[in-house]
Amino acid sequence: MIFNKRKSVILCLAACLALTACNFPGMQAQATKTTQADEVQSVLQTSMANAILGMTQTASVGKPTISSNKAGNTPAPGTIPTIKATQKPEQNGTGTDSATLAGETIPDDSKYLPGTTFTKTWRLMNSGSSTWTNDYKLVFASGDQMGGNSEYRIPLPVEPGKIIDMSIQMKAPDTAGNYKGYWKIKNPNGTVFGPGGTGSFWVKIEVASPTLTVTAQPTATPTMTETATQTSN
């Protein structure tokens, strides 16, 4: 009987082993599927983590850095590059040009004989805001030129408020009459000006014809001689 019980137990064990053997391939397949799913999920999670990390790093690179300066920590100013000046500055710039007559020689209506040479001098003050350089000129404007050149260069710089004497050698015309010539100053841009901005300087003379002066000869004064006459008694 005991043998039969052992036999029955052995048979039951054999049956269990057979059933387990029949189901083992399915269990292996299920385990394999579970492992593959876990691996796929792990890969996906790793990829997502890497993508999020890359986006975070990109955002941090593109984001400007703001630094706070506390009191006393003023940043050093940037260095301004020095450019070598190779261009000449504008002579007239944005200033104004004007002149004032401060004095002159040869008053108006001075009389000269035909062909007489004389020197006219104007004492000019720079009453504008631009410096007169040697590119400024005294130029003949209109009227009687009387032997002068068309223009004379200003010989030295004249700053605003300063005075310069400009002299011109002239010659009285050969014909008697009244003569007047107008002069102005011309800046480097070609603009002419004078007193008040648009006025002129002038020279005005009178040429007189030479007159023949006759000197009268003195007449002899008769001499009276007293003659004594004797009378006889």
Image (cartoon, grey):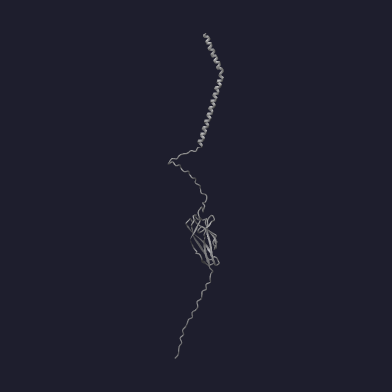
Quadrant containing the C terminus is bottom left
Is 226 rendered above or below residue 189?
Answer: below
Residue 137, percent across and down?
52, 57
Residue 189, percent across and down?
54, 54
Furthest residue in direction bottom, as rendered:
233
Residue 106, percent across and down?
50, 64
Exactly how many numbered labels are in the figure? 0
Residue 226, percent across and down?
46, 84
Between 65 and 205, the residue placed more toward the observer is: 65
Furthest residue in direction top, as rendered:
1
Is 27 rendered above or below residue 227?
Answer: above
Is 126 rendered above or below residue 212?
Answer: above
Is 96 rendered above or below residue 74?
Answer: below
Between 15 and 164, the residue placed more toward the observer is: 15
